[in-house]
Image (spheres, rainbow, N blue to C red):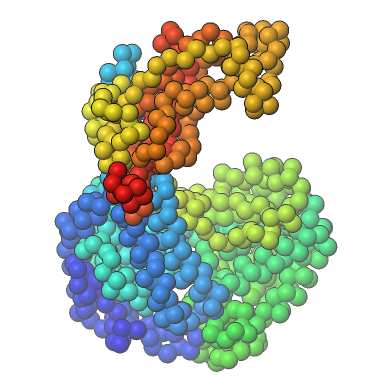
Amino acid sequence: MNGEMNLGCYAEGKWVRASDAGVLLRSAVNGEPIAAASSAGIDFGGMVEYARRVGGPKLRAMTFHERAAMLKALAEYLNERKQDFYSLSTQTGATKKDSWIDIDGGISTLFVYSSKGRRELPDDHVLVDGPPEAISRGGTFTGQHVYLPLRGVAVHINAFNFPCWGMLEKIAPTLLAGVPAIVKPATSTAYLAELVFRRMIDSGLLPEGAMQLICGGIGDLFDHLDCQAVIAFTGSKSTADSLRQHRNLVARSVRFSAETDSLNCSILGPDAAPGSPEFDLYCTEIVNEMTSKAGQKCTAIRRIIAPAKWSGALTAELAKRLGAIRIGHPAREDVDMGALVSLDQREEVQGRVRELERESRVVYGRPEDFEVTGADARQGAFFAPVLLHCANPMKARAPHIVEAFGPVATVLPYDLLEDAAALARMGEGSLTASIFTHDDKVARTLVLECGPFHGRIVLINRDCAKESTGHGSPLPHLVHGGPGRAGGGEELGGIRAVKHYMQRTALQGSPETLTAATRRWIRGAKQLDPGAHPFRKTFGELRIGDTIKTGERVVTLEDIGKFADLTGDRFYAHTDPDAAARNPFFKGQVAHGYFIVAAAAGLFVDAPFGPVLANYGLDELRFAKPVNPGDRLRVRLTCKQKTLRAGTGYGEVRWDTEVTNQNGETIAAYDVLTMVATRELLNEIVGVY
Ligand code: NAP
């Protein structure tokens, strides 16, 4: 630890001691004291004010790309120090594999957000949302949605089960958005979160005020939040329900996103008979979900929805596999499942199993006499897996509402596929469902019937199982969260999560003003004379709005024929006048769309060696009108957006491109994407450019 028993709070740029001894936190493995946590005496109002006054402005002064680079550096820094985290993680009851999900999973989330930030966000402070909206006839008044970082603070309240991942998966999108955070880890495992947090501060990579930490209660923190704050909560539904009703949060419409417990299900398709690959995969996944992190995963499978005709075979197979699970000291390589987080949690899970037993029968469980390898069963929070069977799941309540946050799951048999879907929905909103079937019709039916009740659905069969990331693993790329019982919130999902910490604002104004506000050229804004062909200008010299208008090219029948010969694209509309005449769109022979794009490049490209290094794609290409032989084409090319790739010597330049015909009608419109060198890089390549 930090050499002392008391965990610190990091407030207003310094580590602060609480004014009382606080709550003693004990090892899940042997009950030994590890640390004490308290936030007594902390000035919570001061923390919020500090975030607003210091952290927010410093983060907002950075561009998305600078923040993304910071996340990468932070991830690398933590990665080099992760052995300390692993050692301490054992005390939470986590095996090495469990800790890998928590620690490496958390660090990799920072890496993913860093990379997505650089690839998918501009090197700017404003995030443009979608294309401009035409809202006036003359085009002088237009609309554009943008996202801007909130001016307040993000309060992250995390659950005990993933002290590292839970903190980092929220921090990554928050910092990328440019918003400072106050992190409050769950007290029982706060010692691990505190260590990781401490290392982040030690790194010196974060701007002052970007992150603060509360180990212990949050006091009057909520009283100080305003409309620019966001609360991202992870924990139980009951805590979320009480917190979101806080008077000040309601009065000021403070955003409150909740990720809570849910009764996640996994469905075995009617085609997946015992002996099939899907049946085997299903059993593997259930045992894995029940035992990894000792079942203390918000996404773990709690409800096993399986065809009634196979529930005997299924329970027998699951019991056999659960019987082979070795429970014990989580640091041992030969142990499959560690301990629950605390003795209190063990009591809590035991109580929940008793509640479940009212409507279900235990078909596998070793409540008292299981063997614990390498640890004292009386001192640690060890708990053996429990498998229940509910004979009448459509009538029962408990399996659909009681979450035993441990290695506990209930088999719910079904006869008809529609009953399987109904049972899934009886969870009233879950984080995750999985479906094991090799029949894609079954998959589609269940997706349509259950989709709106789940934040994520994993479809597993023999074709994808090997590479599948599994039922219970949230990924930074995909949304995590779910409706109803799961809290109704949403996290992760790539850049979507960044937007949770930003305000979407619809701007209305002239194209010129909106271009200035967003640094992204909008049609109708001024077209600047570049002074030279824009392909002769370096990345730094190009200005948003630099435009060239090309000369004309006449499209001939011979061009169309040659293009067909060259490419082999002999679609009748280009090569057969009679057939083309019958086509309701063309009513005659037309040029290939790809010919128009190629011919446009022939008009606007400046050939000799220069700053443009490569054309790496087109975006949003649409062919608006057919081109007939004899039509005359022109191109307008305007520098729309510039995004420097820091440290590379070049940047992406997006060109708004419009091809028109002799009547001034738009034939094709698209964005051309190029990589353009800086002068420094050109000088390196050719001496003095
Ligand atoms: P919890 O008791 O609801 O606690 C969650 C967090 O809320 C902790 O940081 C806790 O702090 C804090 N908290 C509790 N009362 C509070 C109050 N009055 N004011 C401010 N903060 C308060 O849940 P838990 O026992 O830690 O976690 C287990 C539950 O979380 C399970 O039900 C599980 O399903 C759910 N979970 C959901 C997800 C998800 O992503 N959806 C992930 C993990 C866990 P203290 O520890 O200091 O009380």
Residue 683 location in percent, x, y?
31, 48
Instruction: Give left or right: position of 139 versus 570.
Output: left
Residue at (69, 42) in percent of width and height: 445
Query: In the depicted view, which residue is nearer to us: 342 or 553?
Result: 553
Residue 29 location in percent, x, y?
50, 86
Query: Can you say whether 619 is above or below 306 in the image?
Result: above
Quadrant for the C terminus, please. top left
Quadrant for the N terminus, please. bottom left
Which residue is most to the front? 687
Residue at (44, 40) in percent of width and height: 614
Residue at (60, 11) in percent of width and height: 557
Instruction: Give left or right: position of 594 versus 635.
Output: right
Residue at (71, 80) in percent of width and height: 324
Query: Can you say whether 29 is above or below 545 in the image?
Result: below
Query: In the depicted view, which residue is nearer to us: 678 or 27?
Result: 678
Residue 500 location in percent, x, y?
37, 48
Residue 537 location in percent, x, y?
30, 36
Query: Can you say whether 3 is above or below 356 in the image?
Result: below
